[in-house]
Amino acid sequence: MADFTLLDKQDEIYNAIEKKKAEGYSDNELYVISKSKLHLDDLHNSQITLIATSGSFSDRMSRLLTGEDGEEAVLTRFNLTEERLEEYKQEVLKGKFLVVATKDNTSHNEVEENNSAYEEIDITHYANESKGPKS
């Protein structure tokens, strides 16, 4: 279950992120959701995901044609109840910020478990003539 922190000011984002890190969340488990694009260069260079619900120009145009709501599209990935989704949607539309922390419970060991390059095999080479170890 995701942990949401609602913030009134952009200046509060850094404190909220530090608090979540102190609680054991890593950068790749943190999201900052805002109505418009945030210009926080130090966060752009981190693994923290910054999401602007307004999206890019092409996002806005496709939403105009499909009638999709940008805030709802972003917030639905966090499996919220209808009431919570509507509450957070309205707060983001008012210009508030959401810091979302969600635990990543995947192992990320797929490469080591499924790649033969990580298998330990015996590569001892024997000379054909002597049937013993090659010197």
Image (cartoon, helix red, strand yellow):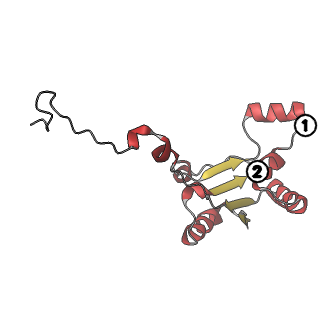
Does residue 46 sit above or below 26 in this rendering?
A: above
Q: Which residue is mark 2?
A: 77
Quadrant including the N terminus: bottom right
41 left or right of 122 in image: right
Disc number placed over residue 118 in the picture, else none = none
Q: Between 76 and 116, which is closer to the camera in this rendering?
A: 116
Residue 126 place in picture, x, y as percent: 18, 34
Does residue 37 sit above or below 106 in this rendering?
A: above
Q: Which residue is mark 1?
A: 67
Residue at the spot x=22%, y=39% of the render?
Answer: 124
Is label 1 or label 2 in front? 2
Q: Amino acid at mark 2?
A: Arg
Which SS class for mark 2?
helix
Q: Between 103 and 72, which is closer to the camera in this rendering?
A: 103
Does residue 63 sit above or below 9 in this rendering?
A: above
Residue 130 place in picture, x, y as percent: 10, 32
Q: Amino acid at mark 1?
A: Gly
Q: Between 18 and 35, which is closer to the camera in this rendering?
A: 18
